Image (cartoon, helix red, strand yellow):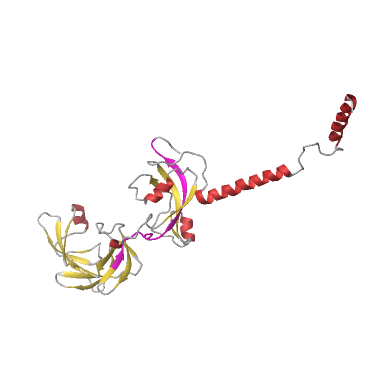
Amino acid sequence: MDKNETAKAKTNHHGDVAGGKAGMPAGAKKPGVGSNKLLALILIIIVAAAIAFVFFGNAPKGRQAQAGDTVTLDYIIRGANGTVLDTNIESIARNFGIYSKDLTYQHFTLKLSPGNGMVAGFTDNIINMTAGQTKRFSLNSSEAYPYDPTQVFELPRESVVPRTATAVLTPAEMSALKIAAGSTVTNKKYGWKMTVINVMPDGKTVVFRQNPSINQYFINDGGWPLVVSNFTDSDITLRLLPGINATYAYTDATSCKTGIAKVISEDNSSVMVDCNNPLAGKDLEFEVNLISIANSTAQQ
């Protein structure tokens, strides 16, 4: 083929392609091959992102939380079987039957530093999170709340208080209660009547004689239910009436670390209580949504 024919052939070829009459040019790929590979790549990316979300949480860009920062977050704590055990989210607490009217449900603020009251494993997992991120992680019982057998105590079923009581009153209280020898007032702690025996020379120290009734029932400051089981001229005997699995404030802070005692057993002479954290001895799964990060040099 001479140069003119070659040129004509090229012209016809391009013309045919433009007109849609010719076959595919040499070296061209079949339709759809490139697009299929692109779709496959997109699917791989989506699957990888889903796996990362499950194991690491969604991680939007932003400054990462560091030791010393103060963070605000929401949390859900589940047992190994998935049961919700604790949360600061009211709707979750209600849905899973753990709502308590005695608690305030609001965002939880925490300083990422030792001694913040949280287990170290929890704080460590918040570090490097970013605001808006949700993260799931697990802690075994030794990492979270180890069970401490020394936090189980035996309390006597009965206690004794003296029949005579002394109180120091302010002038305003003396006037309001109309304190005078022989007058009667109500004991705010126990609910029974008291008779004024004497007012000391200082004019503010008052001696009372307490006058309970047998089987008189009352709740003390820690929420413990008690009843008057007996009294003599010198003493009043009080008997605890707790319920199994009920929890009460335990003011003996030198021994009860949590300040809350759960009744685990009782008999005629004693009551056994457990001051361990309610989550102690359990493997736990945490879900944390980090809302904000703040420190002295950076604000979110």
Q: Residue furthest front?
A: 1
Q: Report the front residue among 131 and 28.
A: 28
Q: Is residue 203 above or below residue 42?
A: below
Q: Residue 73, image x and y in percent?
A: 44, 48
Q: Residue 82, image x and y in percent?
A: 48, 60
Assess whether residue 22 is covered by the magenta stretch.
no
Q: Residue 221, image x and y in percent?
A: 28, 61
Task: Give the residue at x 21% y 70%.
Answer: 237
Q: Is residue 110 visible in the rendered structure shown here?
A: yes
* Magenta-drawn segment: 272-296
Which quadrant of the view contains residue 2? top right
Q: Residue furthest left?
A: 201
Task: Give the residue at x 76% y 40%.
Answer: 29
Q: Is residue 213 left or right of residue 99?
A: left
Q: Is residue 225 visible in the rendered structure shown here?
A: no
Q: Is residue 98 left or right of residue 188?
A: right
Q: Report the front residue among 300 and 14.
A: 14
Q: Residue furthest top?
A: 3
Q: Is residue 26 above or below residue 45?
A: above
Assess whether residue 277 is covered by the magenta stretch.
yes
